Amino acid sequence: MSNGGFLEKLLDGAAVEWLPLEKIAKIKHGKDWKKLNEGDVPVYGSGGIMGYVDAFSHDRPTVLIPRKGSITNIFYVEEPFWNVDTIYYTDIDTGQVVPKYLYHFIKTIDLMALDTGSGRPSLTQAILNRLEIPIPCPENPEKSLAIQAEIVRILDSFTELTAELTAELTAELKARKQQYNHYREQLLDYEGKAVEHLPMGDERVGTFTRGGGLQKKDFADAGVGCIHYGQIYTHYGTYAHTTKSFVSEEFAKKARMAKPGDLVIATTSENDEDVCKALAWLGDEDIAVSSDACFYSHKLNPKFVAYFFQTEQFQMQKRVHITGTKVRRVNADSLAKILIPVPSAKEQDRIVEILDKFDTLTMSLGDRLTREIKLRQQQYRYYRDLLLSFPKSDGAA
């Protein structure tokens, strides 16, 4: 069915009037609250819930529209709330408009095109007041609200389906990760077995080298591969064959370079859990490594070492070496003291083969989750645009 046919059936001959937002809702400013987390009323800013207080600014269904910052973050709220100065709330005339209908329609608008800020994105009341909202069958409010409610019902069914599917796939992914972690712990636990545990800095095992003065400003469009410590958290998994970033050949001549097979380790983080996140570099060329990271040159299977860094066995030993307050650190000298099991090369290969399969399965489920959510969001947007693409008269703006 075409867009027109779908809407025609829904409208059943009813006319559509486009009204300025100011005719159906009043846009109101928020007010900052100095002390948060002193109640159970959510406080909204342009990024979402900031905390909780013991009073509310509005207690009816509304659409929240950011005034500054993340101006595309539109929220629909039904419970009592407080909003700060960076986000507007709408006092909606529910005799004309179903609040959630307004929410769904505003999400079809390209708010970034209305940005008036010179640096930080901003939306003014004047601009928002001029937004035109389609009101079906305006001469018959009861029928108009019924049409709007049906549109909301259909669109909500898609968002609910997405939420249900996300919860189902997330639970499945969590279960697989727990299973994976369990087997990894078991496979790398050689306590009481005839396997020697050596300090990682032992000359029979390997050496740590601190990264050099590589900063993001040193990145080049092409050249020699490099890994900045922050990318270890945001871009890489257990291992990598290619780098996201590069430096010039001239810069590489003075950089600290990791060789194929080395482990690259982030030695700083904002929390204890993430510090020392590591990846095995499996590419064909040497790569530059930044400061706040180090690399481990060793005689073991690279993936075996990378998987070892993910175990509780490693984490327990790491914790006693963490220093710093806001920024948590473990230096290369401390890492050299951590004991690592050193089974035969054949045993290392066996462990890696098993864990690779679990790692691939987990990544596959993660990719499936991302793909399914994206498809459901596309489906929602398709039907939203289908249901809200009301015709305008020739004289309409």
Image (tube, helix red, strand yellow):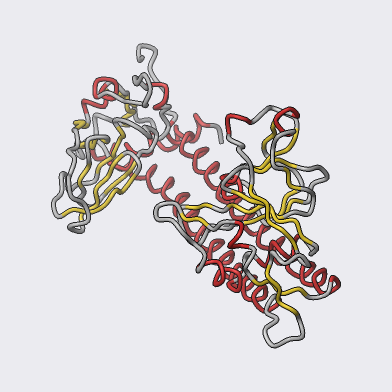
Please provide percent x and percent y for residue 274. Answer: 53, 58
Residue 212: which quarter of the image?
A: top right
Give the quarter of the figure containing the N terminus. Answer: top right
Please provide percent x and percent y for residue 12. Answer: 39, 35
Residue lying furthest top in this view? 395
Give the quarter of the figure containing the C terminus. Answer: top left
**Closer-to-camera residue (104/235):** 235
Residue 204: which quarter of the image?
A: bottom right
**Closer-to-camera residue (251/91):** 251
User: Relative to residue 226, is residue 249 depicted above or below?
Assistant: above
Please provide percent x and percent y for residue 22. Answer: 22, 25
Residue depicted at x 69% and y 32% = 247
Question: How many numbered marks appear?
Answer: 0
Residue 338: which quarter of the image?
A: bottom right
Residue lying furthest right in this view? 346
User: Relative to residue 365, is residue 291 depicted above or below?
Assistant: above
Q: Does residue 260 appear in this view?
A: yes
Residue lying furthest left in this view? 55
From the viewer's perspective, tell me whether residue 264 is left or right of residue 20: right
Please provide percent x and percent y for residue 71. Answer: 36, 32
**Closer-to-camera residue (303/300):** 300
Residue depicted at x 50% and y 55% = 329
Residue depicted at x 55% and y 32% = 2
Q: Does residue 147 appear in this view?
A: no
